[in-house]
Amino acid sequence: MPPARIFSIANCVSRFRGVEMDWKTEKRKLGDLIPRERNPAKISDHDKEHLGKSLERFGVVIPFVVQPDGGLIDGHQRKLALSLSQEYGPETVVDVRVPSRRLTDGEVDELAVRLRRNVGEFDWDILKEDFDKETLAEWGFTEEDFEEAGFGFEGDENYTRKIVTPEYEPSDVMPGLGELFDTTKTDALMEEINASDLPDDEKQFLRIAARRHTTLNFSKVADYYAHAEAEMQLLMENSALVIIDIDRAIALGFVNLSKNIAEMVGDEYGDEE
């Protein structure tokens, strides 16, 4: 994995220094901070929940960034979270960072974006070494974060850097076809779709989409394959239900994506010895 990128707001600061701008910290009432109508930043419900937890536990750690007249540049979600809390009100005094002159609309747009975008990323090697997954999840990390970073944790087999192709040793018993799949979710969706008042073409589309919720029991599939007739085995291989010959699977296109990714990684970072 490439090293985490580290960003700085130095360029932003030096640019404003070029127009002789200074910043100072002041005290302002929460009710005097005026939100922007065109705020480019947003927050998910998940992050909003954890922002509330952080404010409840530690209070306001990061100052708001405002125009001299109190117009908010950065801190909209913090102001909203505080306003929804019974412990804070319009008269609550908070720290704000204020420029020595009013910023133009273009400067406000740039700074608002930079303060959200030009920030550091986490070093997942350190996170994995020093923290457990449950703690990180409690602090706001999601399963998608762990998966995107490609890191597993001790005792957690769901997320790992190493991709392992599952191998099954077939049993002596041939399972029934009904044991190879589960249509519980699909059947429930089909009932809802059929009972709806939607046009037939929309219903048909939803029925096709609903089939993707059918899950396969691949260990049972492997058992069935081992006892099936040759024609059935061939068709199961063509459907990638089992992969017996990796070269044939590549020829059929089932593992092209993995192959292409491996080549791109090699081009970008070099092959490891």
Image (tube, helix red, strand yellow):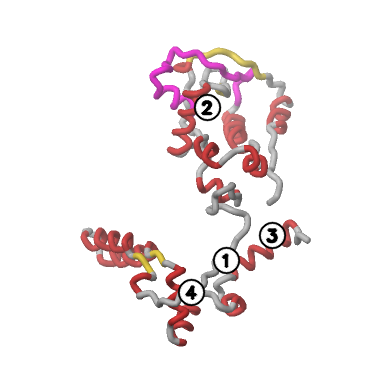
- Amino acid under disc 1: Thr
Q: Earlier in the sequence, mark 1 or mark 4?
A: 1
Q: Is mark 1 on a helix, strand or loop?
A: loop
- Where disc 2 sits, the SS reads loop
Q: Which residue is drawn at 61% across and 34% down?
A: 110
Q: How far apart are marks 1 and 2 (CA)?
A: 46 Å
Question: Badge 3: few (under 14), some or many (20 or more) residues near its Cα, within 10 Å?
Answer: few
Query: Residue, x 57% and y 50% (percent of image)?
Result: 148
Please tell me whether mark 4 or mark 3 is closer to you in this view.
4
The answer to whether any part of residue 219 appears in the image is: yes
- At label 2, counting other C-alpha atoms closer than 10 Å, the crowd grade (few under 14, some 14-19, many 20 or more) is some
Residue 101 position by quadrant: top right
Q: Which mark is residue 75?
A: 2
Real-space Cα separation, disc 1 to disc 4, in angstroms:
16 Å
2 or 4: tag closer to the N-terminus: 2
Residue topped by disc 4: 170
Label 1 belongs to which residue?
165
Disc with the residue nearer the chain's start (4 vs 3): 4
The magenta segment is: 75-103
SS of the residue at dot 3?
helix
Is residue 96 rendered magenta in the image?
A: yes
Q: Nearer the viewer, residue 5 or 27?
A: 5
Instruction: Quickly name the residue at label 3.
Output: 265
Residue density around tag 1, few if under 14, some if 14–19, many if 20 or more, within 10 Å = few
